[in-house]
Image: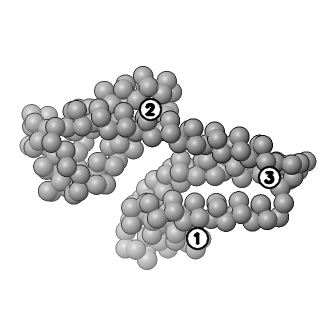
Amino acid sequence: MNYTLLPDEELLNLVKQHEDESAFREVYNRYWREVFMVAYRKVKNKEIAEELTQNLFLSIWEKRKDVVILNLHPWLLGAVKYSVINYYKSQIVHEKYIRHIHSTAQGSVSTTEQMTLQADLTDAIEKGVSLLPQKTQQVFKLSRFENRSVKEISRDLNISEKAVEYHITQSLKWMKVYLKDYLITLLLASSWLDL
């Protein structure tokens, strides 16, 4: 089947009804550059624009059974603009939080504050893991929480070692992005302890 000849509606139907990765790849190839350029013009940062673009297409794949898209091109442009708005909102919240931490710091962080930061980080890790796809979540927990090797996870879950490595890579990328605000906070707190 030549996917490049299919209209968007047929491609979306193949993705939704048959989980057709080739159809999804065609949707991605057809629109990723335009979506990236819209994001890039708004955020003026290549890495962030790439991340927003990848996250948008990833969410389409992950929510393929539930998402309702009547007209793909305008939907994508609207969705990436919404992603940019959410990015800026999170940056504003992050900056306010950092300013608040700076203004309330008084030379050192108390043990109670350390425990609170640690509890917040633990909660953030648990929440970040819970947002991963089920199989990726399972592999991540076995790898990072139970210190299992790739070979052991492969054997226990009856999947290839390559698949295990893929899930670990994807989960680490996601957690790095998801936890960046918490890690900055933790680094600031630990630097105050050294004063």
Residue under circle 3?
Answer: 190
Amino acid type assigned to the residue bearing label 2 in the image: Ala
Residue under circle 1?
Answer: 145
Amino acid type assigned to the residue bearing label 1 in the image: Phe
Residue at left offset 87%, top offset 52%:
108
User: Where is residue 190 drawn, in percent x and y?
Assistant: 80, 52
Task: Please state which of residues 140 and 61 is positioned toward the viewer in this rendering.
Answer: 61
Residue at left offset 44%, top offset 25%:
42
Amino acid type assigned to the residue bearing label 3 in the image: Ser
Q: Quadrant of residue 161?
A: bottom left
User: Where is residue 81 drawn, in percent x and y?
Assistant: 36, 33
User: Where is residue 71 drawn, in percent x and y?
Assistant: 16, 37
Q: Give left or right: position of 190 versus 156.
A: right
**In the image, is residue 147 above or below residue 125?**
below
Q: Give left or right: position of 188 versus 79.
A: right
Q: Give left or right: position of 53 versus 126.
A: left
The answer to whether any part of residue 126 appears in the image is yes
Look at discs 2 and 1 and give the one toward the viewer. Answer: 2
Residue under circle 2?
Answer: 49
Quadrant (top left, top right, bottom left, bottom right) of the N terminus = top left
Q: Which mark is residue 102?
A: none
**In the image, is residue 118 above or below residue 21?**
below
Q: Earlier in the sequence, mark 2 or mark 3?
A: 2
How crowded is the residue under tag 2: few (<14 C-alpha within 10 Å), some, or many (20+)? many
Look at discs 1 and 3 and give the one toward the viewer. Answer: 3
The answer to whether any part of residue 151 appears in the image is no
| Disc 1 to disc 3, C-alpha distance | 23 Å
Q: Earlier in the sequence, mark 1 or mark 3?
A: 1
Residue at left offset 43%, top offset 56%:
166
